Image (cartoon, coloured by chain):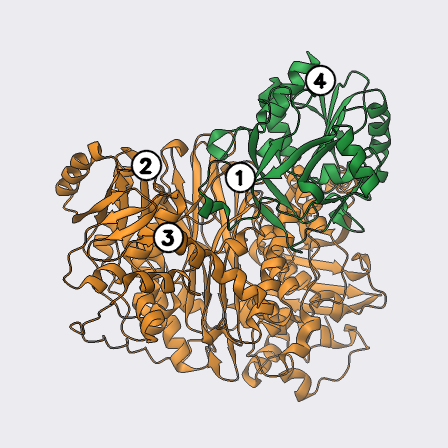
Amino acid sequence: MNAALLVFPGSNCDRDARVALTRACGHPPRDIWHTECSIPNDIDFILVPGGFTHGDYLRPGAMAARAPVTRALVAHAARGTAILGICNGFQILTECGLLPGALIRNTGIKFVARDVHLKVERTDTMFTRAYRESAIIRMPVAHMDGNYFADNRTLSKLNDDGRIAFRYTSDPHAADWVTSAILANPNGSIDDIAGIYNEQMNVLGLMPHPERACERITGSTDGAHLFTSLIEHLS
Amino acid sequence: MKAEDISSDQRHLTPDSITSHGLNKEEYLALLSSLGREPTLTELGIFSVMWSEHCSYKSSRVWLKKLPTTGMAVVQGPGENAGAVDIGDGMCAVFKMESHNHPSFIEPYQGAATGVGGILRDVFTMGARPVALLNSLRFGEATHKKTRHLVGGVVAGIGGYGNCIGVPTVGGEVGFDASYNGNILVNAMCVGIADIDSLFFSAASGIGNPVVYVGSKTGRDGIHGATMASAEFDSKSEEKRPTVQVGDPFTEKLLLEACLELMSEDAIVAIQDMGAAGLTSSAVEMASKGGVGIELDLDQIPQRETGMNAYEIMLSESQERMLMVIKPEREAFARAIFDKWGIDFEVVGKITNTGCITVRHKGDVEANIPLSPLGDNAPSYERTLIMPEPACKISGTEAFESSDIAETLIQMIGSSALSSRRWIWEQYDHTIMGDTIARPGGDAALVRIHQTDRALALTCDVTPRYCAADPYQGGAQAVAECWRNLCAVGAEPLAITDCLNFGNPERAEIMGQFAATIEGMAEACTVLNFPVVSGNVSLYNETAGQAIQPTPTIGGVGLVDDVNAAATISFKNTGDKLVLIGPHGHHLDQSIYLQIIHGRAEGACPPIDLACELRTGQFVREIIRAKIVNAVHDISDGGLLVAITEMALAGGIGAQLRVSENDFVRKLFGEDQARYVVSARDGEVSELLSRARTNDIEVHLLGETGGDSLKLEGCHPISLMSLQIAHESWFPELMKS
């Protein structure tokens, strides 16, 4: 896998993504600064990391979506390059039109940082082939604006096309008294949507952080399979 | 310089303008004699902020010298932007804690946010990458009309800044008490990691070297913030809102990356962040420390408002700014880095040999002051003090009966003092940077040293009600509890930073509290070999004559050699044995039990036996390292049963306990110090007991883990579900009401 990592002013999960990609691929990704007008053709995977690009001023992802490098990203997407947007990266992907819908303020009007459980909706995509079928996985979320919203038509199209990647769900192993107190859906996303694909299934955006779930000692290894899936697909 | 060279547009100074600058008559006379003439308004402003309590430590300096500041691990003690301790492999942990109390009371979101921003800058100014944030918060009573608003704003502000800049907030503590109704405390701690031989310091050198300003543009915000932080509040304090600065964490993130990038090259001679008293204090400190002079040309200062005068530019506390002295031949190189990050970079002056700070603006000299009276020879007072009398002990034989332990425990665990703080820490990104091993909610957070198997253990602690009862013992207890929390995760405690929050030092009894607290802290630091490497003093925390409880917050840093061998509080298995390390509890004075169940906030601070603390903590570290125990929790607020409840809830596993009925309540809820609860597999217990004998440590078998309730012999079982509900609901209920 020949990975690239986009870095914007205010990206702050780029180091975590770099560590996770290096661990998965054996070599570090190529960093691409936001002012670059092109992304090399030999790149076959582009990660748009989380953070507060441009301070989230205006709207999360709105300014990064208009950066020169984002135009190059859109061009790569059209050629079928695998693209993953995490958290603020997901927001950038919706803002630049690669993914439908929008990520609005969490229903609690508060930043939310905790582990969530996700149902892997399908395991036949380039991002999820290494997961067991209908697996329930755990990884952290950390965001203020992760409440996915789309109009009914978009929503039914996403559902019909099998483009929901992950949905928030409750912890299947915890006792009822533990889970009853905690809402499975941390931000009010419509239909519990945590991540979606584009029509061509080569662009994935999700709010949870797979790059923070690659080591047992930090809480979970469930995110690592996402990178393994891509490596399998691209080799 | 002759008087006529000084700016002509100065207004004539009136006695009013002198007192409104916080200077008393003696101080103004000292100013006149050091200057040899009347000051300009700008000069008066400079003296005013440099001689404020906040910048000069004029009431506390003589006492702070009593704290031990050296030790094997100390790389940098107090006096720089932050302290540093050796953590092996040529690296050091750089850390400091600072208060932002007054601004947070006036404008909670921005006050708390800029507190975080300031402490982050203190750490990365030293050349360290910040890896963790913690905070210690005190609010008024939960029922007070402002509390909910202040809690919401402060927590959102801390989160807003830390989350955006991308440094995990991994721990902290919060308390509620009526003494903070008019003066909340927001103490923020930052920890960074640097290579020992690439630390950066603030002493300027090299006559003629350029002085460079980087960061946000200067505006009129925060003018006189340091003076505000050095006065009592009154009913008009909210009119001081314009003195609160506004934070921009996005700019700070860019500033952080640009500074660290430049620091990896050989270009910086000295660097200092612009915190309290802005450009004034950073310029004065850099030049004073280097024994040189400094000349500033204010026309070159990046400004975001038009028409600012010299006074305003020198005193602005606009955030996210740094002052650097760089090697002249590296100027273009340095500028290119800041251009790339989109951050202002301007040469605003030069280092001189005059021993003075000289400020020019629009062709006039606005200030020309010898540095020595501003820095090293600023006023320092040995204020009158009355040493406090420790509160009397409630009769040791007073019998306490609890007919219903279940109800008592549920009431305690669901109280403002002991309820879960999840509502707070779920608003802080605590997993970013990928090295958070132990998240908030345990005894100490664990942050792995990037790409190693070692970790820093971090905690903030203080028990103000103990300090109010007995400042000396309370000061010692704060240090001891911090030390104990580090031991409880298996870390070797290295050093502390402190944030000393007190009332008005011009009152003899407050100064006495301060002095006694320092003495207590100093003794604990000495015995536990736990030196102070950085810190901050916040005085005048009182409103309309009502002072806060003395609150010496202690931030501790420890080192874990093998992160896989660290301990956490959660029960791991069913059938493990529970062991009390230390004697059974007895001391109910000043306990949470007495406060919550009997409505009595009275009695003496629990006695602190530092030798016993040391022995017990070393023993606990030994059994953690030897992997004999699989869960460890120190016993503090609420006593033994609360500690066990927290362990059970964290692991989702209950316990059966056998505690003899003699003095049952005192055993369950006593807050005697130097004690821990551990769990161990059945097969390890004999080893644990034999090591305890060898080390002369008292231990008691308490029962075993299992089930979904806490069962005490002779009492109704208490379901974990009911405990969980009580524990988790208090905070959300408070914030919803």
> Dot 4: what SS?
loop
Nearest to the eye among marks 1 and 2: give it. 2
Between the C-alphas of marks 3 and 2, the distance is 38 Å
Label 3 or label 2, whichever comes before in sequence order: 3
What residue is pinned by disc 4? A2
Label 1 or label 3, whichever comes before in sequence order: 1
Front-most of B202 and A147? A147
Q: Residue at x 16, y 49 (%)?
A: B698
Say yes or no: labels 1 and 4 on the same chain.
Answer: no
* Residue type pointed to by label 2: Asn
Q: How would you rate the neighbour count of disc 1 (Cα within 10 Å): few for under 14, some for 14-19, many for 20 or more? A: many
* Residue type pointed to by label 4: Asn
Residue B250 percent coordinates (x, y): 71, 49
Between the C-alphas of marks 4 and 2, the distance is 44 Å
Using the rendered image of the protein, determine whether residue A206 is visible from the camera's viewpoint.
no
What residue is pinned by disc 3? B531
Say yes or no: labels 4 and 2 on the same chain.
Answer: no
Horizontally, is B95 left or right of B618 in the view? right
> Dot 3: what SS?
loop
> Dot 1: what SS?
strand
Indicate the quadrant containing the C terminus of chain B: top left, top right, bottom left or bottom right.
bottom right
What residue is pinned by disc 1? B194
CB within 8 Å, label 1 to label 2? no
Between the C-alphas of marks 3 and 4, the distance is 49 Å
Nearest to the eye among marks 4 and 2: give it. 2
* Residue type pointed to by label 3: Pro
Say yes or no: labels 3 and 4 on the same chain.
Answer: no
Mark drawn on residue B573: 2
User: Which chain is orange in the picture?
Assistant: B
Residue B145 percent coordinates (x, y): 56, 76
